[in-house]
Amino acid sequence: MPTPEELQKISTQVRRDVIRMVNGAASGHPGGSLGVADFLTVLYFAIMRPDHAQFTMNGKNEDIFFLSNGHVCPAWYSVLARYGFFPLPELGTLRKLGARLQGHPSTMEHLPGIRIASGSLGQGLSVSIGAAIAKKMNGDKHLVYTLCGDGELQEGQNWEALMFAAAKKIDNLIAVIDYNGKQIDGPTEKVLPMGSLRAKFEAFGWEVTDMNGNDIPDILRVLNAVKSMTGKGKPNMIIMHTHMGFGVDFMMDKHEWHGVPPTNEQALNALGQLQETLGDY
């Protein structure tokens, strides 16, 4: 099991990958990707620890993950490659014509680690509930994890899914909200205020836990604690507080970096703030 220090080295390298990938493609979403790098690193390398050599689409007898806010896939691609799902140099093909690493995850390209196409926001939670039900029907005791964006909660389908999961006692599901308060058009509070997410989720019948998504020891602590809360008749929600653009000072907490690639000069600046720890692809 990696130590918190080792996990930090991986997540820092993931952030370097994100900057280089999005800069190289001259297109993509760096802000949210940088914000979720710690979470995805911990989830794969310390919590789920899937067998990358035996990837199956049905995910039987293993924990599985669905990315709902598909635009942050550069961080996910990096974690998958560094975990061993596909060759590391392939990260350099992000958004290239005919590449498996599309701008949003795609199953059409048969990229190992990807089970659904995502990026049409609001759908991931529903898919995750379906997968969790399938595990229950198959007698599979493993868990389903999903990551959704906070701006994504403005899609009504999420609230139908939230209501359904509680009513049907989907207690083998851990959903995580990337709560950075930013979306492409500005702060979520200005685009469409959502009030207290905790109060809403609790009112819908979910167990709710807060987590600092940019602090690896806290991510480890909370994910392990919430795992122990599964199987008790209620679905679990983690409100994960993150900073958009975390790790790069000129991107931090700025919604403008939701979907804008850094220039070559900006990329060099960003990489200067992120120490190379495991070797670039």
Image (cartoon, rainbow, N blue to C red):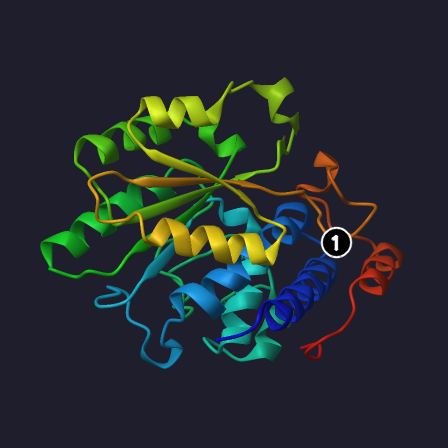
Q: Residue at x 31, y 62 (%)?
A: 63
- In the picture, the quarter occupied by the C terminus is bottom right
Residue 233: quarter of image: top left
| Spot occupied by residue 16 in the image (x, y as percentages of width and height) | 72, 65
Looking at numbered disc 1 in the image, what kind of residue is underneath it?
Answer: Gly
- Look at the image and tell me whether residue 99 can be seen: no
Q: Residue at x 22, y 49 (%)?
A: 231
Q: Residue at x 71, y 47 (%)?
A: 245
Toward the viewer: 240 or 273? 240
Toward the viewer: 110 or 223? 223
Q: Left or right: 272 with respect to 223?
A: right
What residue did someone put label 1 on? 247
| Spot occupied by residue 280 in the image (x, y as percentages of width and height) | 71, 76
Q: How many marks?
A: 1
Q: Residues within 10 Å of mark 1 (few under 14, many from 20)?
A: many
Q: Left or right: 190 with respect to 221?
A: right
Q: Residue at x 37, y 44 (%)?
A: 124
Toward the viewer: 263 or 141? 141
